[in-house]
Image: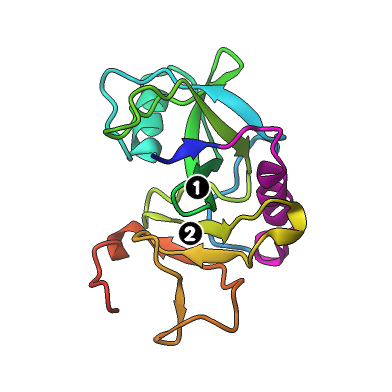
Amino acid sequence: MTKPLSPSSPHAKSLHDYLDNHWALNGGDLGLPKADYDKTPVLSVPCIPSDTGKPLQCWFNVDEDVRAGKGSAVFGWALWHAPWADHYFAQPHAVLRASGELVCITPPEPGMEELEHLTFFADPRIPFDYKQLRVPMMLCYKGGDSIGDFGPFRWLDFSHKPLHVDGAWSTERPDNFNMGSMLEANLADDC
């Protein structure tokens, strides 16, 4: 089972620092609307699922609560560990700011019902594009026992496969940051 990283773990710090200093996120216009909140450090955010929310639909769950006047959307990165593969992930995510506090309102996916807290940091550079359904891809790296053992960072598509560049899987350019459309999530595995 995938589980959230500890906010104080070296892996959480490594993912945060990498994304915080990423050239593509800092260097240009990604064509997304600008957010009106600041970055945060890595935090432990309580999970209080919405009664009307759906698993794996964080952006839409938060949007529904914002439209209902329950708070404001905060976009950023959820940090996860997949212990069976020793992989660490930074996944674009949305939480709700209600009464000044961040809360994850998205119900857990099957098998993760016991999730009480999510490891998250806000990043105003990556709000979700509701018009074109675009979002930055997920970041992954294979871990090790120490910071020096961290493998190369890889951007993954919505099927958790490495992004490809010009029709080929990227092997020489592991930092192939890209914006993806949720409309592309159902492409064939061999695209």
The answer to which image quadrant residue 45 occupies is top right
**Which color scheme did the rendering employ for the protein?**
rainbow
Residue stretch rendered in magenta on the structure = 5-28
Relative side of 181 to 12, left or right: left
Q: Residue at x 54, y 81 (%)?
A: 171
The answer to which image quadrant residue 28 occupies is bottom right
Q: Is residue 48 above or below residue 60?
A: above
The answer to which image quadrant residue 141 occupies is bottom right
Q: Residue at x 48, y 45 (%)?
A: 83
Main SS, magenta residues: helix
Mark 2 sits on what residue?
137
**What crowding class fits label 2: few (fewer than 14 Cα within 10 Å), some (14-19), or many (20 or more)?**
many
Which percent across, then down, holds residue 63? Answer: 39, 33
If the image is split into quadrants, where does the C terminus sit?
bottom left
Magenta highlight on residue 19: yes
Query: 130 or 122: nearer the eye?
Result: 122
What kind of residue is marked 2? Answer: Met
Mark 1 sits on what residue?
92
Q: Are marks 2 and 1 in contact (CB under 8 Å)?
A: yes
Local SS, label 2? loop
